[in-house]
Amino acid sequence: MLILKNARIIPELTEGYEGDRADIVVSDGIIQEIKSPGTAVTGEIIDLTGKTVIPGLIEGHLHLDLCGMNTFEENVQPDAYRAMRALKLAQDNLRNGYTTVRDLGDRNNIVISIAQAIDEGMVKGPTILPSGRIISPTEAGNDFFGSMYLEADSPDEFRKAVRTQYQAGAEWIKVMATGAVMNPGGVPGAAIIMEDELMEVCKTASLVDRPVSVHCHGSEGIKMAIRCGVKTVEHSTIMDDECIRMYKKTDKTYMIPTLSAPFAFVEFPELVPPFMTEKSKHVVDVLTEGMIAAREAGIKIGWGTDAGVYPGSHGNGIYEFRLRVKKIGFTPLETLIQATKNNSEIFGIDDKVGTIKEGKQADLVVFNDPPDQDIEALSSVFCVFRKGIMV
Ligand SMILES: [Zn+2]
């Protein structure tokens, strides 16, 4: 029995308890009780007076098999070497408070195996929700990423590809719907998938109970994704008024914007090839506009960073929080809700994680300073618990 004594908790991130101070009783990896401060007495006590505890952060979009180097060099590194590096990056994320991460694309499905090894307790790491390889129409620039893309070019081929990824152990089915910023050939806004192909993906994935995540920068692609019943729209960069209205209306499809990558490409051009910076300049402006419109419309928004796409992006989640606060106008607390409660509900894992609640998994992050008051406090991690074990 572990007692986190006299912790400051945040009511918006806590369920079934009134108040902002509590003793949290943990055993068998589960939050057993949330009690009035000072009332839990038996067990191993960690005094958290003056510290703030929040539910484990959920990184909704990263790539553990990318570390921001030249992808042609990465592509020829052996799977075993990249798997070791990906595990290390996963552990770095965990130490920063990300107890769950969703990985949306690797080469040769290596992250699916890492997720399994962590699940089995063979190695330490965060809970990983992996997609494995990304299913994509044949598209200029796919070869930039070696074996990351599984190409398909008709409804039948997409059906086969979804089943192939399901068979490989994918928790999510990741599909490319529009051009990418990182591929030298792609036009970010243009749709590259046909609606009958994406519809077939969603039908096949629902048969095997796997949610679909779609890479999508442009408004036509976003509308298609919502019509087809995709679960998450990644990036959701170029949104017109109709996109905002459709998001507002649906309870099936949610946006996981990733501001970090395009903003970093513009702010730190030395990190990436010149074509990425060029493509990103326009992207940054329209993304900011669309996000402000989404905030004003009160749309439920998830949280992700696309970590892996530039050097130093893993473990730099604070950059995404800062952008959402400074550029879009969210309060620090609203961004914390996006990265915990919202992501858990959107990903369908809110029965286990996402808030501090009796009966949920004891995935908790303790900060010296209160991150709901100043987002910079996210760099003051005191300790992290995953399934009740201190990391
Ligand atoms: Zn990505």
Image: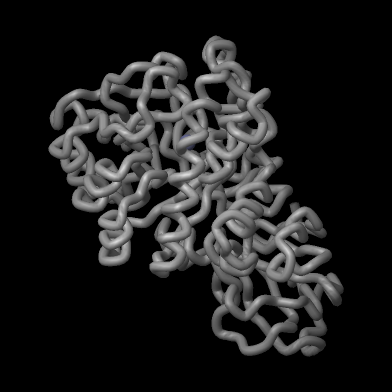
Q: Between residues 387 and 345, which one lies in front from this camera angle?
A: 345
Count every numbered label the image shows and give the total.
Answer: 0
Q: How is the image coloured?
A: one colour
Picture quarter with the N terminus: bottom right
Of residues 15 and 305, the one drawn nearer to the viewer in this rendering: 305
Q: Is residue 204 left or right of residue 173?
A: left
In the visual, does 16 lie left or right of 163?
right
Residue at 62% x, 89% y is 18
Quarter of the view holding residue 105: top left
**Can residue 265 be seen in the rendering of this structure?**
yes
Q: Position of residue 146 (x, y in %)?
A: 45, 15
Q: Quadrant of residue 312?
A: top right
User: Is residue 123 in view?
Assistant: no
Q: Position of residue 252 (x, y in %)?
A: 28, 60
Q: Is residue 163 above or below residue 100?
A: above
Q: Is residue 200 above or below residue 348?
A: above
Instruction: Give the side of residue 370 with respect to residue 128, left or right.
Output: right
Image coordinates for residue 182, horizontal then vertical, percent: 47, 26
- Give the residue at x 67% y 31%: 268
Which residue: 56% across, 19% down?
274
As drawn, is 212 to the left or to the right of 255? left
Q: Position of residue 379 (x, y in %)?
A: 77, 53
In the foreground, 334 or 172: 334
